[in-house]
Amino acid sequence: MRQVLAVVALLQACAVAGAQELPLEGDAERGRLVFGACRTCHYAEAYMGHNNGPNLHRIFGKVAGKQAGFRYYSQVFRDAEFVWTPQLMYAWLEDPMRMFPNSSMMSLGVPDPQARADLIVYLMQASVRE
Ligand code: HEC
């Protein structure tokens, strides 16, 4: 857990320093298809609300594990104090269980780097739309 916090702190330091870029350029249209696997549990549109997972509309900039009305956060997410950034989500989704082994999110993430960048760009765009 200490290691995880160190990684989170490092990624946040990068975000503060203005290194907002992902390692790869993403494509929102491709990312929309990648998000299909997440839709089993998550919606990206605000009006759809929560599913088995919390709503992901405007998730960037929010503190993890704190969305009102979602009852199934794990203890590790309830206790989390970090803010979601594109870089952090990119790192996490490579292998979600590695970063947060006690999370209640049953997903293998998106191991492919390009697909992951596409997904994140999609989520950034979906978050701008109402
Ligand atoms: C089987 C259901 C399921 C799938 C599939 C799934 N998630 Fe989740 N997700 C969850 C649950 C449950 C949580 C809450 C985790 C916790 O509290 O430990 C969560 C949490 C999250 C969060 C944190 C939200 C917050 O409010 O802090 C993000 C971001 C997220 N998921 C993104 C994704 C993405 C992107 C995908 C697709 C690659 C995905 N998830 C696939 C169930 C799922």
Image: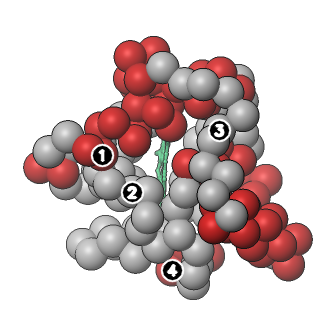
Answer with left or right where residue 26 lies relative to residue 70: right
* Residue 127 numbered tag: 1
User: Dot 4 surroundings within 10 Å: few (below 14), some, or many (20 or more)?
Assistant: some
In primary-sequence order, the first of circles 3 and 2 is: 3
Give the mark nearer the N terminus: 4 vs 2: 2
Residue under pointer 4: 78
Q: Quadrant of residue 29?
A: top left
Figure check: 111 above or below 91: above
Q: Nearer the viewer, mark 3 or mark 2?
A: 3
Depth check, mark 4 against mark 2: the one in front is 2
Amino acid carrying label 2: it is: Ile
Image vertical order of residue 2 relative to residue 111, above or below: below
Whether the residue under disc 3 has CB within 8 Å of ligand 1: no
Q: Amino acid at mark 1?
A: Ser
- Measure how far apart labels 4 and 2 are at the Cα level: 15 Å
Q: Tell me whether the residue at label 2 lies in contact with that at label 1, contact meaning CB atoms closer than 8 angstroms.
A: yes
Q: Callout 3: helix, strand or loop?
A: loop
| CA–CA distance in space, label 1 to label 3 | 17 Å
The residue pinned by badge 3 equals: 22
> Which of the 4 image quarters holds residue 8?
bottom right
Instruction: Identify the residue under disc 2.
Output: 59
